[in-house]
Amino acid sequence: MKGMTTKKNMNSKSELNKNQLGKVSETEYFSQGEKVSIVGIVGNVILTAVKIAAGIAGHSTAMVADGAHSASDILSSLVVLISLKIAKKPADEAHPYGHGKAESLATVAVGVFLLGAGLSIVYFAAKSIISGHTVEPGMLPLLTAILSIVSKEAMFQYTFRIGKKINSSSTIANAWHHRSDAYSSVASLVGIIGARHGFLMLDPIAGIGVSFFIVKMGWDIIYNGVYQLMDGFSDSQTIEEMKQIINECEGVSDLKAISVRQSGPYIFVDLKIGVDRKATFEQAHEVAGKVKSEILSKVSNVKNVHIHVDPVDTKCRKGCEVKLMDLTKDEMLERAKKPAEEAIKLHRYYQGKMQTVPKCCIRDVSDFAIWYTPGVAEPCKEIKKNPDLAYEFTNKGNTIAVVTDGTRVLGLGDIGPEAGLPVMEGKCMLFKYLGGVDAVAICLDTKDPDKFIETVKYLTPAFGGINLEDIAQPKCFYILDELRKDCKIPVWHDDQQGTAAVNLAGLYSGLKITGKRIEDIKVGFFGCGAANVATIRILISAGVDPKNILIADSRGVLHPDRTDLEDVKYDVKRHLAQLTNPQGISGGPEKVFEGADAVFCYTKPGPDVVKKEWVAKMAKDAMLFACANPVPEIWPWEAKEAGARIVATGRSDFPNQINNSLIFPAVFRGTLDVRASVITDEMCIAAAKTLSECAEKIGMSEEYLIPTMDQTWVYPEVAASVGVKAIEQGVAKLTASRDDLVKMAEERIKAAQETTKLLMKEGLIKSL
């Protein structure tokens, strides 16, 4: 695209020191940008008032027009401030250029305001000339013009310096608006001086003269903003550098398209590359991974690279462009290791993840007489009369216990209660940050399920709910059933119910994409642990026909004739064997894939636990949920090659992460807000439906079944659906409308997140 003088001055990275980029944090980017915008708004409000007043009092058309120019500068600074507020919101994975777009739109708006100011000055000045209404201006406009020149030039220097420092195109554009206002005042000064020396028409003529400069400046800024929206990036040197890297990568046949966008100090790259037409899907994926790795390592300030590969293996691609995973296998394995490497250092540094912080005001120590003795005795007396008042006088209504015996922690197995504590603290952190729920980690030193049950019962007076966590099967089923039966507060096992609900959400979305009906589909389950057992129960409640279900454990398909299931500890499996598989199919795990519309895998880390040839035997438009961590049972691209249309995993760096962290904070938020006595399967189904509906609002696709954790607006929606269902089922003690429940959840969650941010800002949670 053709260059222009203004673009070079305002937004070219040759004007900005390239080495400066990336040296400001995102926090500094927004804080500095907002600060300079506020200075612009306040300064221009004052100058506008002074100029217009001086122009009217001193009979100067040029000065009144100059005041109109400053008024447009108020709008420019305001729109830049708004754009920065918008850009603060996290960009979605599907739209990683949110900041850059907000910047570009603000830049266009600044140009529009300048254009409007220039045209308005032409109007006022021309009207004055045509009417012949020219009066010798007084001293006040002259002095005001001098004041304006000095102040506007100072504003330009300050704003331009900050704009360069944080590399904000809209801030730099706003600086040039300040400079154009200074030039306007120079022209006004010349006109006023001329008019005071007898050349009366020079005052309005000066107004027209400056308007042409302003109009030109406005047009150039608009042009620059539109250029950013279309092409996104003006640093030809950096683009050429990336082109060279791409063309030198082995396996790349050609570079078909490159789109680069700036977001504050960061650069985002979107590529379309060609590869050998004979290349397999996996080979093309490896090429894409190499390209990404090279760009990230050799080009500074690149935040992310999305790569599209021109169709290869047309049987798999169906002749259309396919977006590949961003990383190679080795890179994915390395990425999986990095959190573990950081975890030791950070856990030792912070000595855990949770702390207790007061929620009441403490003005001075005299308040202790209210919150503790003697004043605390009064609410105690009231609660003794009516135990339900504990929900009003204490934090019971927003506090749950996260309880484990450490017998099946993550994929680590029976590591004991102490070793399970970091996981329980992490769970409490997610409850608080994502759901606004206060949670306490409790690790019990017993493996006896009856003692576990007894202990939890003793704990219930202090809590509004119980979250069971990381308990070995089959006792986890017994513990959950007994506690749900006997406790007056809701008891939930996230490994069962949470996983089941998020699986159902993914299935709902998959059915919408494939056009299949839940009552017609054939579903396979590879693995018969807590996650799949609960998923089977929830899916049957949601409409899946148990006759269309086939389950395999480590010994093969479950069927009524399996003699190894006669042991009492296999009661759950024996029940499922009688409920499903009416044909009595036997054999290995490959059987559950044959003709299946969907298969849920919760077995052991892969890859190659699930074979490509198994996936190839699934039904048309099949859905595969390969949820082992840290590596799924089969790589997603291999499953797609084998014929699966939709593939979901448990990993955040692959599309379609099936993550129960989207469920449990919201389910408990909704449960506590209506003070439900139990979390029913119907409440879980309501949560799943809402999660799928939220994905539809954003743009559901084969690579986006359910929202991600950073889309925090989803949690209040899910919480409200859970609360409404509890009210409908008559298990809630409190009632509220859906809108009120959404608002309540939003306030709780916002308070939790803002508290954390405030503690970090004040240094009470230290940064590394």
Image: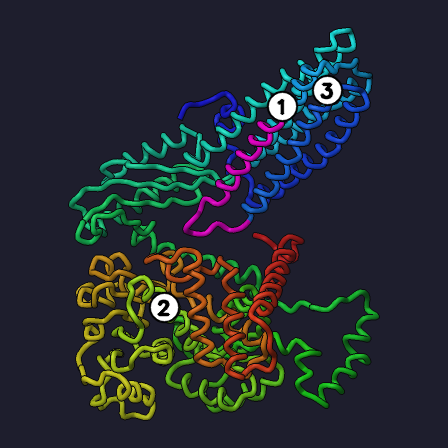
Seen in the picture, residue 656 relative to 604 is either above or below; the reply is above
Q: Position of residue 222 (x, y in %)?
A: 51, 30
Residue at position x 54%, y 50% from top? 89
Front-most of residues 460 and 444: 460
Q: Is residue 466 left or right of residue 239?
A: right
Q: Say whether marks 3 and 1 touch (CB < 8 Å).
A: no
Residue pointed to by mark 1 = 180
User: Could you say where residue 417 lies in the image, as x and y percent from the top left?
Assistant: 49, 78
Mark 1: give few (<14), some (14-19) or many (20+) Cα within 10 Å.
Answer: many
Q: Which residues are magenta?
A: 89-117
Q: Secondary structure at mark 2?
A: helix
Q: Is residue 253 left or right of residue 390?
A: left
Which residue is identified by label 3?
61
Residue 637 colored in magenta in the image = no
Q: Of the residues shown, which amino acid type is indicated by label 2?
A: Tyr
Q: Look at the magenta stretch and give its main secondary structure.
A: helix
Neighbours of disc 2 within 10 Å: few (<14), some (14-19), many (20+): many
Q: Residue shown at 41%/77% (left/top)?
A: 496
The image's colouring method is rainbow
| Sequence-earlier tag: 1 or 2 | 1
Which residue is disc 2 drawn over? Answer: 508
